[in-house]
Image (tube, helix red, strand yellow):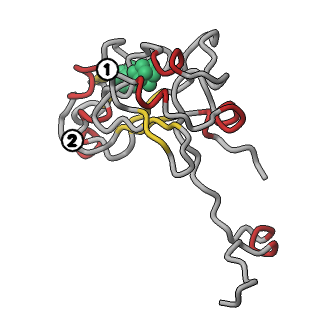
Amino acid sequence: MPAHASTAPSRRAFLTGKVARPEPEFRPPWTDEARVQAQCTGCNACVEACPQGIIEFDSRSRPRISFHGGECTFCGACAEACPQAVFDLAQPAPWPVTVEITSSCLNAAGIACQLCTDICDPRALRMDLSVRPVGAIQVDAGACTGCGACLSTCPNNAIALCDPRQQRTPA
Ligand code: SF4
Ligand code: SF4
Protein backbone atom coordinates (compact mmCIF):
# COMPACT_ATOMS: atom_id res chain seq x y z
CA MET A 1 0.00 0.00 0.00
CA PRO A 2 1.39 3.45 -0.87
CA ALA A 3 2.49 5.50 2.12
CA HIS A 4 -0.25 8.04 1.52
CA ALA A 5 -2.99 5.43 1.19
CA SER A 6 -5.64 5.41 3.90
CA THR A 7 -7.35 2.43 5.50
CA ALA A 8 -10.31 4.66 6.37
CA PRO A 9 -13.57 3.74 4.62
CA SER A 10 -14.30 5.87 1.55
CA ARG A 11 -16.98 8.55 1.52
CA ARG A 12 -18.84 6.48 -1.07
CA ALA A 13 -18.82 3.47 1.25
CA PHE A 14 -20.31 5.58 4.02
CA LEU A 15 -22.98 7.04 1.75
CA THR A 16 -23.98 3.65 0.35
CA GLY A 17 -24.18 2.11 3.79
CA LYS A 18 -21.46 -0.45 3.07
CA VAL A 19 -19.53 0.39 6.19
CA ALA A 20 -20.70 -1.48 9.27
CA ARG A 21 -21.26 0.85 12.18
CA PRO A 22 -19.93 -0.42 15.51
CA GLU A 23 -22.40 -2.18 17.75
CA PRO A 24 -23.66 0.07 20.55
CA GLU A 25 -22.18 -0.72 23.94
CA PHE A 26 -24.12 -1.65 27.07
CA ARG A 27 -23.10 1.18 29.39
CA PRO A 28 -23.18 1.09 33.23
CA PRO A 29 -26.17 2.28 35.29
CA TRP A 30 -26.85 6.01 35.76
CA THR A 31 -25.19 6.90 32.49
CA ASP A 32 -25.60 6.51 28.74
CA GLU A 33 -23.59 6.67 25.54
CA ALA A 34 -23.69 10.46 25.27
CA ARG A 35 -22.46 11.05 28.82
CA VAL A 36 -19.74 8.42 28.46
CA GLN A 37 -18.50 9.92 25.22
CA ALA A 38 -18.63 13.49 26.50
CA GLN A 39 -17.25 13.07 30.01
CA CYS A 40 -15.32 9.81 30.46
CA THR A 41 -11.53 10.09 30.52
CA GLY A 42 -10.92 6.33 30.74
CA CYS A 43 -9.43 6.60 34.23
CA ASN A 44 -10.59 3.08 35.22
CA ALA A 45 -12.08 4.15 38.59
CA CYS A 46 -15.50 2.60 37.95
CA VAL A 47 -13.99 -0.66 36.72
CA GLU A 48 -11.97 -0.99 39.91
CA ALA A 49 -14.87 0.07 42.15
CA CYS A 50 -17.46 -2.48 41.03
CA PRO A 51 -17.62 -5.24 43.67
CA GLN A 52 -19.35 -7.51 41.17
CA GLY A 53 -16.59 -7.18 38.58
CA ILE A 54 -19.08 -6.57 35.81
CA ILE A 55 -17.61 -3.35 34.38
CA GLU A 56 -14.92 -3.65 31.75
CA PHE A 57 -13.40 -1.34 29.16
CA ASP A 58 -14.47 -1.42 25.54
CA SER A 59 -11.88 -1.13 22.77
CA ARG A 60 -11.69 2.64 23.33
CA SER A 61 -11.19 2.41 27.12
CA ARG A 62 -14.74 3.38 27.97
CA PRO A 63 -16.82 1.42 30.53
CA ARG A 64 -19.36 -1.17 29.54
CA ILE A 65 -21.24 -3.88 31.42
CA SER A 66 -20.35 -7.51 30.84
CA PHE A 67 -22.38 -9.69 33.20
CA HIS A 68 -20.53 -12.98 32.50
CA GLY A 69 -22.33 -14.72 35.36
CA GLY A 70 -22.57 -11.69 37.64
CA GLU A 71 -25.32 -9.19 38.25
CA CYS A 72 -25.67 -5.52 39.07
CA THR A 73 -26.72 -4.89 42.66
CA PHE A 74 -27.14 -1.16 42.00
CA CYS A 75 -24.81 -0.40 44.87
CA GLY A 76 -23.73 2.83 43.18
CA ALA A 77 -20.01 2.26 43.75
CA CYS A 78 -19.19 2.93 40.10
CA ALA A 79 -21.00 6.25 40.10
CA GLU A 80 -19.48 7.33 43.40
CA ALA A 81 -15.94 6.42 42.29
CA CYS A 82 -16.11 8.40 39.07
CA PRO A 83 -14.31 11.77 39.31
CA GLN A 84 -16.04 13.11 36.19
CA ALA A 85 -19.66 13.94 35.38
CA VAL A 86 -20.27 10.61 33.67
CA PHE A 87 -22.88 9.27 36.09
CA ASP A 88 -26.07 10.96 37.28
CA LEU A 89 -27.27 9.41 40.52
CA ALA A 90 -30.22 11.82 40.53
CA GLN A 91 -31.82 9.87 37.70
CA PRO A 92 -35.15 8.35 38.78
CA ALA A 93 -33.93 4.85 37.83
CA PRO A 94 -30.42 3.46 37.24
CA TRP A 95 -31.27 2.45 33.68
CA PRO A 96 -34.25 1.49 31.51
CA VAL A 97 -32.94 -2.05 30.97
CA THR A 98 -35.24 -5.08 31.00
CA VAL A 99 -35.07 -8.59 29.56
CA GLU A 100 -37.02 -10.57 27.03
CA ILE A 101 -37.44 -14.31 26.59
CA THR A 102 -36.42 -15.33 23.09
CA SER A 103 -37.66 -18.17 20.91
CA SER A 104 -34.74 -20.27 22.20
CA CYS A 105 -36.57 -20.79 25.51
CA LEU A 106 -36.89 -24.51 26.18
CA ASN A 107 -40.60 -24.11 26.91
CA ALA A 108 -41.11 -23.05 23.29
CA ALA A 109 -39.71 -26.44 22.29
CA GLY A 110 -42.06 -28.26 24.64
CA ILE A 111 -39.44 -28.85 27.36
CA ALA A 112 -40.65 -27.59 30.73
CA CYS A 113 -38.20 -25.24 32.48
CA GLN A 114 -38.50 -22.34 34.90
CA LEU A 115 -34.99 -22.01 36.30
CA CYS A 116 -34.93 -18.28 35.64
CA THR A 117 -38.06 -17.58 37.69
CA ASP A 118 -36.43 -18.84 40.87
CA ILE A 119 -33.50 -16.42 40.84
CA CYS A 120 -35.43 -13.24 40.10
CA ASP A 121 -35.79 -11.33 43.38
CA PRO A 122 -38.25 -8.72 42.04
CA ARG A 123 -40.47 -11.56 40.75
CA ALA A 124 -40.39 -10.16 37.23
CA LEU A 125 -40.45 -13.62 35.65
CA ARG A 126 -43.33 -16.02 36.04
CA MET A 127 -44.48 -19.22 34.43
CA ASP A 128 -47.75 -18.93 32.52
CA LEU A 129 -49.18 -22.44 32.48
CA SER A 130 -52.08 -21.41 30.27
CA VAL A 131 -49.75 -21.57 27.27
CA ARG A 132 -49.72 -25.04 25.68
CA PRO A 133 -48.17 -27.51 25.97
CA VAL A 134 -45.80 -26.86 28.91
CA GLY A 135 -46.24 -23.16 29.64
CA ALA A 136 -44.25 -20.03 28.84
CA ILE A 137 -42.14 -17.55 30.82
CA GLN A 138 -43.69 -14.10 30.98
CA VAL A 139 -41.70 -10.95 31.80
CA ASP A 140 -43.18 -8.16 33.90
CA ALA A 141 -41.22 -5.30 32.36
CA GLY A 142 -42.43 -2.96 35.07
CA ALA A 143 -40.85 -5.14 37.76
CA CYS A 144 -37.64 -6.08 35.93
CA THR A 145 -34.66 -4.03 37.06
CA GLY A 146 -32.30 -5.33 34.36
CA CYS A 147 -29.98 -6.66 37.05
CA GLY A 148 -28.82 -9.53 34.83
CA ALA A 149 -29.10 -12.23 37.49
CA CYS A 150 -31.29 -14.43 35.34
CA LEU A 151 -29.05 -14.40 32.25
CA SER A 152 -26.62 -17.06 33.38
CA THR A 153 -29.32 -19.34 34.81
CA CYS A 154 -30.76 -20.14 31.38
CA PRO A 155 -29.33 -23.41 30.02
CA ASN A 156 -30.22 -22.38 26.48
CA ASN A 157 -29.06 -18.74 26.50
CA ALA A 158 -32.63 -17.65 25.78
CA ILE A 159 -32.76 -14.46 27.87
CA ALA A 160 -31.84 -11.26 26.07
CA LEU A 161 -31.28 -7.76 27.40
CA CYS A 162 -33.39 -4.89 26.12
CA ASP A 163 -31.56 -1.58 26.53
CA PRO A 164 -33.42 1.38 25.00
CA ARG A 165 -30.29 3.50 25.50
CA GLN A 166 -28.66 1.50 22.70
CA GLN A 167 -31.27 2.25 20.06
CA ARG A 168 -29.76 4.34 17.32
CA THR A 169 -31.49 7.31 15.85
CA PRO A 170 -32.19 6.75 12.15
CA ALA A 171 -29.44 8.03 9.84
S1 SF4 B 1 -23.96 -0.21 40.66
FE1 SF4 B 1 -22.47 -1.47 41.82
S2 SF4 B 1 -22.75 -3.59 41.06
FE2 SF4 B 1 -23.74 -2.18 39.55
S3 SF4 B 1 -22.14 -1.74 37.99
FE3 SF4 B 1 -22.02 -0.08 39.50
S4 SF4 B 1 -20.47 -0.77 41.00
FE4 SF4 B 1 -21.10 -2.60 39.81
S1 SF4 C 1 -32.88 -9.00 34.89
FE1 SF4 C 1 -33.08 -9.22 37.14
S2 SF4 C 1 -35.10 -8.31 37.64
FE2 SF4 C 1 -35.07 -8.68 35.39
S3 SF4 C 1 -36.01 -10.71 35.10
FE3 SF4 C 1 -33.77 -11.04 35.25
S4 SF4 C 1 -33.41 -11.46 37.44
FE4 SF4 C 1 -35.45 -10.53 37.30
Q: Is residue 111 placed above or below 20 in the rendered structure?
A: above
Q: Quadrant of residue 111?
A: top left
The residue under the point 60% across, 56% down is: 22
The residue at which mark 2 appears reads as 155
Q: Quadrant of residue 113?
A: top left
Residue 8, horizontal then vertical, whole percent: 70, 72
Q: Quick one: SS at disc 1? A: strand
- Residue at the far bottom: name it: 2
The residue at which mark 1 appears reads as 126
Do callouts 2 and 1 mark residues in contact (Cβ within 8 Å)? no
The residue under the point 58% across, 21% down is: 30
Calculate the distance from the C-alpha at mark 2 to the C-alpha at mark 1.
Answer: 17 Å
Quadrant where the image shows the N terminus: bottom right
Q: Amino acid at mark 2?
A: Pro
Within 10 angstroms of label 2, few (less than 14), some, or many (20 or more) residues?
few
Q: Is residue 24 placed above or below 54 in the rendered structure?
A: below
Q: Would residue 53 be seen by someone viewing this image from the given angle?
A: yes
Q: Is residue 143 left or right of residue 107?
A: right
Residue 11, horizontal then vertical, whole percent: 81, 72
Point out the quarter of the image occupied by ligand 1: top left
The residue under the point 77% across, 75% down is: 10
Q: Quick one: SS at disc 2? A: loop
Q: Earlier in the sequence, mark 2 or mark 1?
A: 1
Within 10 angstroms of label 1, few (less than 14), some, or many (20 or more) residues?
some
The residue under the point 34% across, 26% down is: 71
The answer as to whether callout 1 falls within 8 Å of ligand 2 is: no
Q: Nearer the viewer, mark 2 or mark 1?
A: 2
Q: Which mark is residue 147?
A: none
Q: Amino acid at mark 1?
A: Arg
Q: Would residue 139 be seen by someone viewing this image from the given angle?
A: no
Residue 28, horizontal then vertical, whole percent: 51, 29
Q: Is residue 93 placed above or below 165 in the rendered structure?
A: above
